[in-house]
Image (cartoon, grey):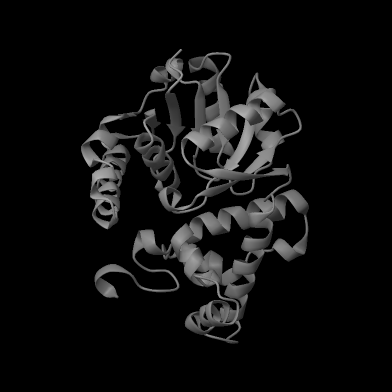
Amino acid sequence: MGQRTVGVVGAGVMGSGVAQRLATFGFRVVLIDLCDGILERARNEIRNNVRFQAFMAKDKGQAPDPDEVVGRILFTTGYEPLHEAFFVVENVTEKWTVKQAVYPRLDEACPDETVYAVDTSCFPVTRVGALTNRPDRVVGIHFMNPVPMKPTVEMIRGHHTSEGTIAIAKALLADMKMDCVLVNDSPGFVSNRVLMLTINEAVFLLQEGVATAGEVDEIFKKCFAHKMGPLETADLIGLDTILNSVEVLYECFNDSKYRPCPLLKRMVDAGLLGRKSGKGFYTYGQGK
């Protein structure tokens, strides 16, 4: 088993970022998604991001080479190459039916020793572990966006997660020049139980006409010294991801405080998803 091969399932924004960071630090990466079009877009985004990273580097001699980074990544729609992976990061969309379909395929393709990291915003790690034949080797790693620029992750210990699994995950992160904060399992963990409520409430303020999006964000940036306001953050993450996460919290806790704002639902229905669609609470690209 190749001890330097890591699988990444899901080639969206988060999965591409994880693959880029792994490949930058010398890992061989198997990046999996449903179709070649998604994978080609991921390939181009990773190459462009590494080029920008190299351009911005103070020490050009230490800057990563885009061709070398992309060359370490196998872009594929099949799970078979995971037979060499000692670690897999699952980044598929926050839909339970989608996650349910992934883990039996991982169990079939991966060696018994392979560790699974669930990169989820809200689903309990224990619930995901129950989909596998190795719940003791399942751990939550909540990467932050954009992954190549964020040095710390939220690590989540599921009910069955072993100390050996946590040690393996921490060692992998250290090789990626990343740190972690280890917390216990709960829907949304720490970060998203707070962040998703904040964003959802900010959308309610907008819906009620209390303030504009710019005014909401300005208060957080100028009064609390946040680098981004909650609605800017929502646009960066993707409003569909925000809505999925809030709905998971609402389902898990059965608490009305997690009720998704109707305006958030309407914007997702309209395809106003934030940066990735060109328009959300703000307008991006040519229309800006």
The quadrant of the rendering that contains the C terminus is bottom left
**Residue 52 % position (x, y):** 26, 54
The answer to whether 268 appears left or right of 220 in the picture is left
State the residue at coordinates (65%, 20%): 134
**Foreground: 104 or 65?**
65
In this rendering, the answer to whether 7 lies above or below 207 is above
**Foreground: 98 or 276?**
276
In this rendering, the answer to whether 142 lies above or below 199 is above
The answer to whether 78 appears left or right of 116 in the picture is left
The answer to whether 97 appears left or right of 19 in the picture is right
Farthest residue, direction left = 67
**Foreground: 201 or 178?**
178
Rendering quarter of residue 207? bottom right
**Residue 110 % position (x, y):** 50, 17
In this rendering, the answer to whether 222 lies above or below 83 is below
Residue 162 appearing in the image: no
**Residue 270 % position (x, y):** 43, 65
State the residue at coordinates (57%, 28%): 116
State the residue at coordinates (68%, 57%): 193
Number of numbered discs on residues? 0
**Residue 177 % position (x, y):** 48, 41
Rendering quarter of residue 202? bottom right
State the residue at coordinates (35%, 38%): 24
Residue 93 appearing in the image: yes
